[in-house]
Image (spheres, grey):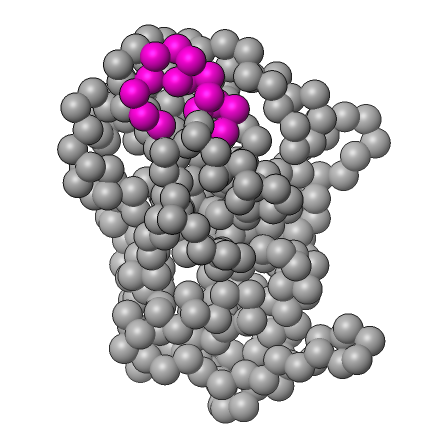
């Protein structure tokens, strides 16, 4: 049997170690070095000839460095005669730039997809892409996993009396509806208007939230403006509590200060991105076992979708 090996960039090394632990494998040895001018250098310290390789690397902040690490690791492994290379990218950066929303702007998600393919990656595994259609930017297989599997048991254990799932914007309705169906509850929608990037204004609540325990569902939480304003609007309409379940804890700018306010009761995230700081309101659930099982299934040519059926 050809065998497989798991490598990791420096973006989220602890997560990679947990994935490897769940696979009962050691992380393979690669030295990532940065020159004084910022250039990244990689050396693979063991033979990978004929092996199926999995590189674990989120392209979170600093996104440019982490993306370049992924590409350079791929090039080193391809030139070392690896049989195949799968990029395991728990958080896929630049995914918000997925269309021409204004004149003379790039579609950066497509550019990143092109770069990943040009480097020699044969498959991508990720979770909760900001827009599902980004899978179509690739001409290689893309497994886009569902973050809801991480939140389901946790929400059930809360034993809410009157739970209801909410989408913080129109774009997240499909995600909220899928999670609500899994929980067998109704959904409500927060209608908002975004004037410019990282700023939003809540306009209206579509649905009845009086006396309800709200579960806000989103793929990521960045500056926390959208989530916190949505929570405030929901409580103004009579919600008893608001818990947010967001797969990717980007948490940039003043996000931590916003979360510490009274609007949001709890924020539940996964470990796709390492937290910059701990906070009593933030609960981190690990998706390392999920990614480990997906890696095992990909290597053995087994169904990945079966995990979510």
* Total tally of numbered discs in the picture: 0
Residue 240: in sight, yes or no? yes
**Is residue 228 toward the left or the right of residue 31 in the image?**
left
For the point 49% across and 47% down, the residue is 249
Estimate the x, y position of residue 64 in percent, counting from the top left. 70, 59
- Quarter of the rendering containing residue 226: top right
Residue range in magenta is 228-242
For the point 71% across and 78% down, the residue is 34
The outermost residue toward the bottom is: 46
For the point 47% across and 47% down, the residue is 248
**Is residue 99 toward the left or the right of residue 225 in the image?**
right
Estimate the x, y position of residue 102 in percent, counting from the top left. 76, 26
Residue 174: in sight, yes or no? no
Who is closer to the viewer here, 273 or 181?
Answer: 273
Position of 307 relative to 54 (above/below): above
Who is closer to the viewer here, 297 or 258?
Answer: 258
Estimate the x, y position of residue 233 in percent, counting from the top left. 46, 17
For the point 54% across and 90% down, the residue is 45
- Quarter of the rendering containing residue 68: bottom right
Position of 138 relative to 41 (above/below): above
Q: Which part of the image, by quadrant, shows the N terminus?
A: bottom left
Position of 263 relative to 138 (above/below): above
**Is residue 88 toward the left or the right of residue 99 in the image?**
left
Who is closer to the viewer here, 206 or 3?
Answer: 206
Position of 174 relative to 209 (above/below): below
Estimate the x, y position of residue 214 in percent, counting from the top left. 32, 24
- Magenta region, main secondary structure: helix
Q: Which part of the image, by quadrant, shows the C terminus?
A: top left
Examine the structure image and report whether residue 38 is included in the region drawn in magenta: no
């Amino acid at each position: 049997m050809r065998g497989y090996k798991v490598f990791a960039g420096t973006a989220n090394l602890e997560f990679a170690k947990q994935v490897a632990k769940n696979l009962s494998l050691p992380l393979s040895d690669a030295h990532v070095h940065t020159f004084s001018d910022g250039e990244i250098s990689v050396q693979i310290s063991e033979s990978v000839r004929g092996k199926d390789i999995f590189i674990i690397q989120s392209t979170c902040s600093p996104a440019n460095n982490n993306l370049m690490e992924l590409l350079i690791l791929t090039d080193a492994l391809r030139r070392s005669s690896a049989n195949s290379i799968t990029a395991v990218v728990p958080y896929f950066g630049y995914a918000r730039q997925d269309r021409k929303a204004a004149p003379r702007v790039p579609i950066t998600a497509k550019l990143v997809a092109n770069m990943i393919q040009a480097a020699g990656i044969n498959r991508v595994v990720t979770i909760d892409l900001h827009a599902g259609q980004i899978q179509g930017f690739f001409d290689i297989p893309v497994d886009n996993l569902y973050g809801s599997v991480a939140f389901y048991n946790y929400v059930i254990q809360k034993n809410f009396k009157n739970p209801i799932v909410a989408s913080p914007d129109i774009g997240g309705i499909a995600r909220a509806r899928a999670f609500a169906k899994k929980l067998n509850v109704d959904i409500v929608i927060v209608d908002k208007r975004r004037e410019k990037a990282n700023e939003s204004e809540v306009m209206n609540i579509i649905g009845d939230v009086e006396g309800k325990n709200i579960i806000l569902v989103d793929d990521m939480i960045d500056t926390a403006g959208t989530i916190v304003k949505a929570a405030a609007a929901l409580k103004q309409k009579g919600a008893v509590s608001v818990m947010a379940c967001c797969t990717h804890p980007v948490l940039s700018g003043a996000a931590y200060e916003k979360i510490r306010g009274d609007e949001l009761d709890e924020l539940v995230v996964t470990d796709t991105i390492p937290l910059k700081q701990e906070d009593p309101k933030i609960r981190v659930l690990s998706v390392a076992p999920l990614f480990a099982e997906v890696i095992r299934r990909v290597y053995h040519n087994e169904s990945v979708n079966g995990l979510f059926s």
